Image (cartoon, rainbow, N blue to C red):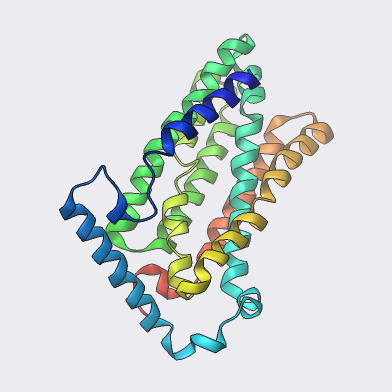
Amino acid sequence: MFVVEGGLSILLVLLWLPMISDRPGQAKWISLEEKNYLEETLEAERLASERRFQPQAGADWSYKRLLRDKNLWLMTFIVICYTTGQYGYSIWLPTLLSGLTRMSLGKVGWLSSLPFLVALGGLYVFGALSDKRRNRRLWTSVSLASFSFSLLLATWFTRWAWFAFALLVFTGFFLKAMQSPFWAMPALLFPPGFSGGARGFINAVGNLGGFVGPLLVGWSVTLTGKMQYGSYCLVLALLAGAGITLLLPTLTTGREN
């Protein structure tokens, strides 16, 4: 299985390399009009970002200052909460489905793939809503809260195995939904020369939740003997992430302060 998974990754890299470009103007698979539109839009956004940070830009900004910025830490804690829920759900999903359905490992593997297919829809829908409304903060918070409540519902209805499975698949819709609105916010909160570093820090430290989530579930199951208490830990982590998101500046709602 691991050889197949690794081989597919290598194959995708070989397919991806000839297609990827550093800038829209270098892309061979879009029209000239699309290239010009994207280049002009990116330049306009860059200039707007520079103007927004002009009063405090330049020598005032450094990576030392970035590490003292409360928004950097708020966004990092949001990702910790999110990855706690995401990895806790993803890693323990086969175990949960096995207990619900009493099916073989092969069938459980197929069932476990469905939430991740549904996640593609959530990624697109929340990205589109965020782009339309320009309210990145709201849609990030809504996606995390929805992830939390749908997982809670699935935990409550485990007595009805296939209904609980349907709710777990529905939960998958919100599994990646926060990604689009969330990762649009660093460019709003940090100057152009520092937003990339901010993203790297948020992602690196935030992925500690990938350790915390599965561990919390395992610890809860060992302590209580019941899977539902592990799910409750994930629900609380996701709700905390939704709440912390609302502490981000008004700028992330599409309105100026």
Point out residue 109 in the picture as x, y percentages from the top left corner. 57, 18
Q: Nearer the viewer, residue 75 or 145?
A: 75
- Where residue 23 sits, quadrant-wise, is bottom left
Q: Residue furthest left?
A: 33
Instruction: Give the answer, above or below, for where 97 lies relative to 80.
Output: above
Residue found at x 43% / y 71%: 188
Residue found at x 55% / y 88%: 59
Point out residue 233 in the picture as x, y percentages from the top left corner. 68, 44
Q: Is residue 166 visible?
A: no
Point out residue 93 in the picture as x, y percentages from the top left corner. 61, 28
- Where residue 37 sits, quadrant-wise, is bottom left
Q: Is residue 96 left or right of residue 113?
A: right
Q: Nearer the viewer, residue 33 or 140?
A: 33
Instruction: Give the answer, above or below, for where 238 lies relative to 161.
Output: below
Point out residue 145 in the picture as x, y percentages from the top left corner. 50, 50
Q: Is residue 49 visible?
A: yes
Tally of marks: 0
Q: Nearer the viewer, residue 61 or 142?
A: 61
Instruction: Give the answer, above or below, for where 247 lies relative to 128.
Output: below
Residue found at x 18% / y 48%: 31
Name the image quarter holding the C terminus.
bottom left
Q: Residue furthest bottom?
A: 55
Q: Residue furthest top?
A: 104
Name the image quarter holding the N terminus.
top right
Instruction: Give the answer, above or below, for where 60 lies relative to 138.
Output: below
